[in-house]
Amino acid sequence: MASSVRNLRQEPELPATDAVTVNKSGEGYDDDDGDLPVLSSHALEALKEFIAEQSRDLAAADDAEDVALVAEDWRLSQFWYDRRTAETVATEVAALCETLSSPRVSCIACPTLYAYFKKIAPGVPAQLLEYDKRFEQFGTEFTFYDYNRPEDLPSPLKNSFPIVVADPPYLSEECLEKIAETIRFLSSPGESYILLLTGEVQKDLAAEVLGLRPCGFRPQHSSKLGNEFRLFTSYDPGSRLGGWENEL
């Protein structure tokens, strides 16, 4: 599908050149400085005001571009990605969608990614599987999910997603194995794309149960977790996401 990824930032427009006057009298400079231009006091104040206004506009744009989520609930092991991570992974998912005739995305326990992806590609069907019912705000694209019951999901979701992204809530073998069951339940038959965000400690298990390899890109969280976090994929991303890491 030819869905496009929108630019997330616009460059500020500069003021018209005739809005600033230049005093070339050389006043205030030593003779050695020659004929260096000097802004008049009026022009300098206008320039300062323009710079301040641009700074305010950029700050407001940054705030608008950040996706608002509910507060993290650490009791549910919720840690939101920082903006760079969310945008990078969401953009990768959007790029994968463009290779598919009927893209559909499932996000398992990663509401940050879901929210950023829907901002980039609002027309692509996506489903958030999440335990926290505060995300019922996403309407029909929310499905309650408890990883302890990995296949207790509506039957229409079975084998219907060519792209599945998952972020297991806990760094345990049991949790990843059950999430893997859900991934297999959701994945379309034939070729599908799997992205897994989890700790470095899960590297061997991710390879064993899902055949995934780590990418060079290192995800980060807004709360700056101490655990080394990784992104694993079932496909070679090429030059994107830092590529697959070479096996040592």
Image: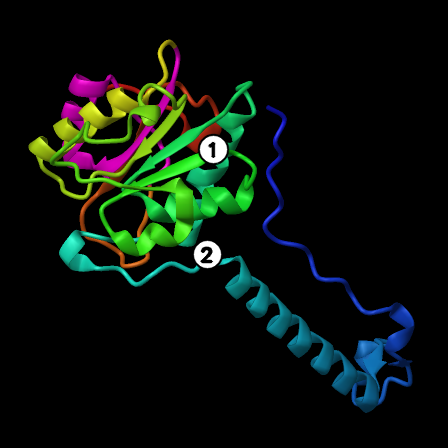
Judging by the rendered image, the residue that carries numbered circle 1 is 92
Q: Earlier in the sequence, mark 1 or mark 2?
A: 2
For the point 63% across and 70% down, which residue is it? 57
Image height of 26 relative to 53, above or below: below
For the point 26% across and 39% down, which residue is it? 167
Image height of 200 relative to 67, above or below: above
In percent of width and height, residue 29 lies at 79, 85
- In the picture as drawn, the residue positioned furthest to the front comes out as 155
Disc 1 residue type (three-letter): Glu
In the image, which residues are magenta? 191-218
- Residue 208 or residue 76, whichever sits in front: 76
State the image quarter where residue 216 is shown. top left
For the point 24% across and 17% down, which residue is it? 211
For the point 27% across and 36% down, which residue is it? 230
In percent of width and height, residue 194 lies at 34, 24
Label 2: how many Cα within 10 Å (few below 14, some 14–19, many 20+): some
In percent of width and height, residue 185 lies at 25, 21
The quadrant of the picture occupied by the N terminus is: top right
Judging by the rendered image, the residue that carries numbered circle 2 is 67
In percent of width and height, residue 26 lies at 86, 84
Disc 2 residue type (three-letter): Val
Label 1: how many Cα within 10 Å (few below 14, some 14–19, many 20+): some
Q: Is residue 240 visible?
A: yes
